Amino acid sequence: MKIPPNFKYIRTYTLDEYYEKANQISLPLIISGGTVAVLMLKNRLIRPEAVIDISQIPELNIVKINKDEVFVGANTKLYKLKDVLPNDSASELIVKSASTVGDIAIRSMGSVGGNVCLGDSSNDLPVALTAIDAQAVIGKKDGITYLPIKNFYIKPFKTVLNKGEILLGVNYKMLNGYRTSYKKHFINFLDHYVGIVAAIAKIEENVIKDFKIAIGGEAVGKPVKFDLSEFSNVDEIKIIKERMFDYVNTMHIENNRFGTANYKKKVLYTLISRAIDEVLKL
Amino acid sequence: MKIKLNINGTDYESDVEPRMLLVDFIRDVAGLKGTHVGCETGSCGSCMVLLDGMPVKSCLMLAVQAEGKKIITVEGLSGKNGLNKVQKALSERKALQCGFCAAGFSIIGTWILDNEENVDYQKVKEDIAGVVCRCSGYDQIIKTITEVAKNE
Amino acid sequence: MSERTEKFFKGKGSFVDDINFPDMLYLEIVRSTKAHAKLLKVKGGLTADALDLTLVSTGESYRKGKNYEVEPVLAKEKVLYYGQPVSAVYDKDKYKAKDLAETVEISYEELKPILTIEDSLSSEPIHEGRKDNIVSRFEVGKKFSPESKIKLSDELFMERVLPNPLETRGIVAFYNSGKLNVWISTQSVYSIKNGLSRILGLNPADINVYQTDTGGAFGSKSAVYPEYVIASYLSIKTKKPVKWIESREEHISSTRPGRGVKAQLKIYGDEKGKIDGIEGKIFVDVGAYADDLSSTSPSWIGYQITGPYMIENVFIEGYSVYTNKAPLGPYRGAGRPEAAFFIERMIDLYADHLGLDPVDVRLKNLPEKEFISPTGLKVLPSKAFFEDGIKKINYAELKKKNAGISFGILIPAVYGGESAKIKVENGTVKVWLGGNAHWQRHELFVKRIIKEVLGIPEDKVVLMNGNTSELEKGIGTWGSRSAITAGYALYKAALALKEKAEKIGLKEPQQVLSSELSSEYYENMQLDPSMISFLLTAAVAEIEDGIKPVIKEIWAYYDVGEPLSLEAIYGQITGGLLMGVQEVLTEALKYDENGKPIPETLSATGIAYSINAPKCNVQITSFGRSNTPHGAKGVGEAGTIGAPPASARAIENLIKKRVNRLPLNLDLLT
């Protein structure tokens, strides 16, 4: 049976407590929702000295709206996002993304922080957050730093977070009057996603004011962002798609259990094309 | 580590290792066998319980994470009047075959009834996606839950 | 309680993991992490060397007279598949048992793993003393020299598929007072009893096997696995109850998967659509060890390759071959879906070549009267059934949707017959069947039969779980056999009880119900053509966005003989259809280049979730009764036989590329 190894359990109620404990423990594992942490423990992929439960830290449990900036605390459960985020387009894209994670139970358990910090190419939020130029809000003992989400990831399952640091949440600017699209493809339900595409565009009378696409998923790895604002008119949709098609074609993609490089490229391009259709076409 | 969990309205206190999984606490400490282990990776929903009203997969939680919360297991859904609406319907319609998924569908079905509006076949089909039934092909389960929800 | 699943909704089931005893020990099996290696050192736990060989047969004695290697209880000297049991540890605390398992040290000298049928045929034997990896060779039919105008060949392949019941395997073994009591999730308490008796050298009279509530099986819970032997052995040694519950990961690596078959076939026919013959080779990948079932699988598949058709010439060479994978076992259908997939795909190839409607070609090749295939298979004429079915599913409309069609037969595994026991006590009729239900809702036909023969109302009848101490002799549930065989035995037992009752003046059902009568019946049975059911399946596919193949809708027009319980029948059919569809799309057990199973979770095996379910339109009919008093035919595996070829064809119709390998190669969509 899959049973975790032994570890100490520490519940921290404040950030200061967390910083203190995290620096004391030689090998800590942070747990918020725990869906992935507990699974990793069960698989004995990690043997932490202690599991530090941060689910009670108030700074991570809030959503703050300050003028047009939104801060979403890392402990915010994925299913709750539709209730706590404002009604702007950037938030809409995040909600669309979060509503597709796993199934209802996973969304009840999983947190924003967990989905952002794992570094799995199949995680949904990083792709949506990349498209809206969100920032990771990183806390450490001596202060807070902000880092664009796309710089948050080093390689699969590795983020920039060092020991003693914590993702407090994510920060992003609200966007008004944009159109959003979120598309993804999996072979098996509740298994990895081959491709994920998040798109957001502001169109005013056929003129493209702003247009960004982020892609992720197993075929991609770390989320990649495309700023397509250089295209000025929705009539250029064909050229935009060709540009994206060319990019996908040049990607180095491996043949593996999710498919051949050919198939995965077709998946990516198809998702991108559908997302472009959704945000550019009336 | 001493922990106290509230399951179906009753407090269960025990000295357990921090690594004890919630599903094992429910089954082995509280002695409630209705919740099952099917896949150990959160892929099948056999272990589903309600945690503060939301469905969670208890095989992917440490017992200690559930402290201070209200846990309802399949046993807690039926009251002194017997099975609840969803369970009664699933039982009468013979929607299940081997019965191993009874807890999973009881929990998600009850949640749908209490939380979803404008329920139709397609919505139920998507909402129950996290619970596996290997025997039945799902159709009768979806039909039954849809009908119960529509009659609410 | 008149509805069986009610207790599960109350949490009052009794599955094997719910069974606990004081002082119980939890067993953890330590398994090979290599697919093919010499065992240099195994330190810790119970190992093959430490097995008391007077107490455990590691297979040699059973091997006498067999031409295959039986799986040993624990690997000795070599491991031949990833996941093979190497050592066993135990503890009172199941968490500590897991910790203990990690302390076992195994060192290997890796050997090259043989992972495909092709490799198997061209590589050194993985078993010493053999000249190659061929376990068995069969010839089915008779060599023929075709003079047909049309000769078409193709190679077809069905990847291995795991049974993956929702409840994994498990056992609680308790040896005390000279008796081995076993509680087990199983398809046959008799298989378990006989197997444990033979392997442990125990007198069968000293073994009691009790079926716990069983959460599905689909073929995986009939064999006597090493873990069952180890649990029983440890109980004998420690005198304590020993529990072993399989983890899903273990199910994926070490429970017997099914399918894993390749066929190289040639179809011969004239230019008008009349098939002259079928010829070719069938290869079954039996994994690292074989048994009677897996080693004879090629001949069983060859036997039914002609399906419902009248094909005058058949010659099939069947081979079963060893590979470094888990031993093969039956998976819902067990040879029937394979045969159906092979013949149906070849007929489509033939029809396409001639530009004829595939349904017309099929109808054209059905016999007008009883037909004995060159393989020995006897089938009744079925043209009326299929013509009726084509109308009932509105084929004319389905054609416009590019539907794929399959014709099929279901041959129930009636050999061995079955037993049944009825005991009336305290106003309740208790029934035990040799073929215990493990998901199929046998209680529904049991109640029907008791009501029909004894007039006793359904809510007074309870079907008990399998139990060797209540019903001493029996066979088990697999191969769509129970309605026919267990139903037959129950019918006879009920008649016998009725006779007993009348002899002592109890004529009314109410009087019988107040009595303390019992009766038991066992009879062997032979397959009769009237027991074979006919299956018409149609599927419509869609390639969503050009990247996601789905089966949108399925039609099944199935012959079930006399329907004993509509609910049970519909449930069996829809469940089987979904399994059949899924093994075309995504469900498969694949291995990496080291022989390690690729899926790490249940979802990664590709099983169907609710969102994968197509719309099912099921119509049943009785195309003749089986020659039993109740007239029922088998139905359990029907969906898994009919759905794969229909689904493969439906996709083929859309992508205009040949689909001859399962699961679907997604590259065909590019």
Image (cartoon, coloured by chain):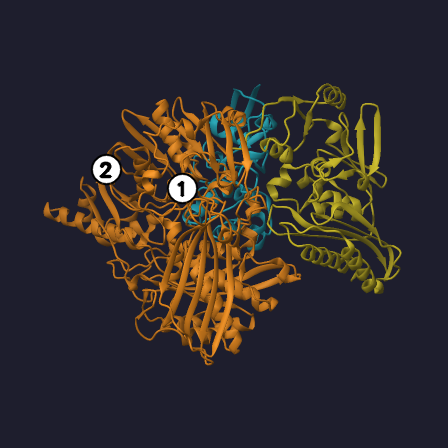
Chain colours: A yellow, B cyan, C orange
Question: Does residue C465 appear in this view?
Answer: no
**Label at residue C234:** none
Q: Quadrant of residue C229?
A: top left
Label 1: few (<14), some (14–19) or many (≥20) C-alpha neighbours in 10 Å: many
Element under label 1? Answer: helix
- The residue that appears at 25% across and 61% down in the rendered structure is C627
- Residue placed most toward the observer, C377 or C325: C325
Check the image and report above or below for C301 versus C175.
below
- Residue placed most toward the observer, B84 or A191: A191
Task: Return the residue at label 2.
Answer: C426
User: Given the current orientation, which residue lies at the most extreme bottom position?
Assistant: C272
Q: Which amino acid does label 2 sit on?
A: Asn
Disc 1 from disc 2: Cα separation: 21 Å
Q: Position of residue B7 (x, y in %)?
A: 52, 29
Q: Are marks 1 and 2 in contact (CB under 8 Å)?
A: no
Subunit bearing disc 2: C
Task: Return the residue at label 1.
Answer: C6
